[in-house]
Amino acid sequence: MKKEITFVQFGCGRMGRHTAQYAIDKGAKLVAAFDMNPDIVGMDFGEFLKKENMNVKIHSTEDADKVFKELKPEICIITTQSLMKDVKDIMITCARNGINAISTCEEAIYPWNSSPAITEEIDRIAKENGCTITGTGANESQYGGMFALFGGNTHKTNRIIAKAQYNVDDYGIALAKGHGVGLTAEEFEREIAAADNISDEERNALIEKGEFLPSYVWNTNGWICDYLGLTIKHQTQTCIPKFADVDIRSETMDAIIPAGKAIGMGAICTTQTEEGLTIETECIGIVYGQGEEDINTLTTFGTPNTEAFVRKPATVEMTCATIVNRIPDVINAAAGFVTTSKMPILKYRVKL
């Protein structure tokens, strides 16, 4: 009989609700959960899901090390923040306890090209304790994964263009602020866009010091290049504010964003490779007005040209399903910080 996978849920927001439920649905056993919100710490996770009692307590994040040592779960699902510096501590706590971990942290899909020092530290500790740490989400399938589906029937590709649009109100206040929601054009230029108005040497210095702020697609391009075995020659990113002509309410910000202030941004990353293939990716995160919806497109230019379009993808649910379907791959991977570009192609699983 196949062994039941035990897991802990770290982060009990909207994403954590989905990932935990999806993992349970596929046969994994939740043994503990963690959050920093005092309103839910101490609550039974079943109550959090608005279901019957599960006898699984939501602990304070400060208790993670103690609980890990006591329960020894097989894997930890981390659904908290978007940057490696913000998830570093919990990843290291997992690594020190020999617990596999997978995170929705966007930078974690390929952090070697933005936070190498942090990633190397986690990698070293995970190898010492025989576990695997990684990150993924809808960005894996919506960018590189789409090419993985039909790239094999392409003779030659010179250029890949991929784009995804999503509603920042679906992901919480940290993401909304990171996308510049509510900023004036001048504030956006000073607080967000100016970070990319630097030379390659200055950017590389920031990366080495762990002070670089990557857009979500910066790391996605690294993932694609690693997956395809390409060597990056040059890479740049640009963040462009998006404005609306009318006032729009942001549920996440709990405020009306006046016309003329940013409702989000588009981040564009362009990668040139030694092999001659150029990759252009764009993520557009905005507060949606009436009738707007998520989109996902991918176009390749070569022999032949190919275009794929996904209308209204459920980006939140896709992110969470990707995390859960990857769990067996993480458990079976080599020890260290191993990106999913090194793992088997993502697939649907009836059971874990």
Image (cartoon, rainbow, N blue to C red):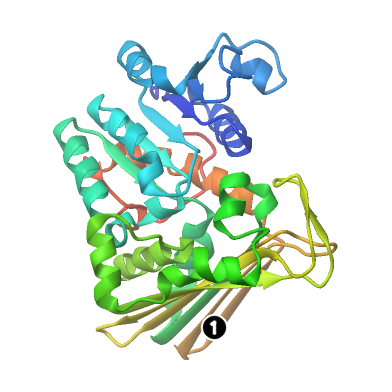
What residue do we see at 56% from left, 43% from top?
320
Q: Secondary structure at mark 1?
A: strand
Image height of 24 relative to 274, above or below: above
Q: Quadrant of the rendered structure where residue 311 is?
A: bottom right
Identify which residue is drawn at 28% across, 34% down: 92
Question: In the image, is residue 232 above or below residue 124?
Answer: below
Return the residue found at the far left: 128
Using the rendered view, name the quadrant where residue 74 is placed: top left
Q: What's the amino acid at mark 1?
A: Thr
Q: What residue would you read off at disc 1?
A: 306
Q: Position of residue 304 (x, y in %)?
A: 48, 89
Q: Dot 1: within a 10 Å radius of its alpha carbon, few (fewer than 14), some, or many (20 or more) residues?
A: some
Q: Residue furthest bottom?
A: 303
Residue drawn at the location 47% of the way across and 29% of the way down: 10
Q: Tally the numbered discs.
A: 1
Q: Is residue 257 left or right of residue 14?
A: right
Question: Residue drawn 54% across and 83% down?
Answer: 306
The answer, for residue 232, to whether it is visible in the render is: no
* Left/right of residue 301 with respect to residue 45 in the rendered view: left
Q: Residue 192's spot in the image, x, y percent?
A: 50, 65
Viewer-proximal residue among 59 and 128 = 59
Residue 275 rendering spot, x and y as whole percentages: 26, 84
Q: Is residue 238 left or right of residue 171?
A: left
Name the image quarter holding the N terminus: top left
Evaluate whether residue 47 shows in this view. Answer: yes
Q: Quadrant of residue 201?
A: bottom left
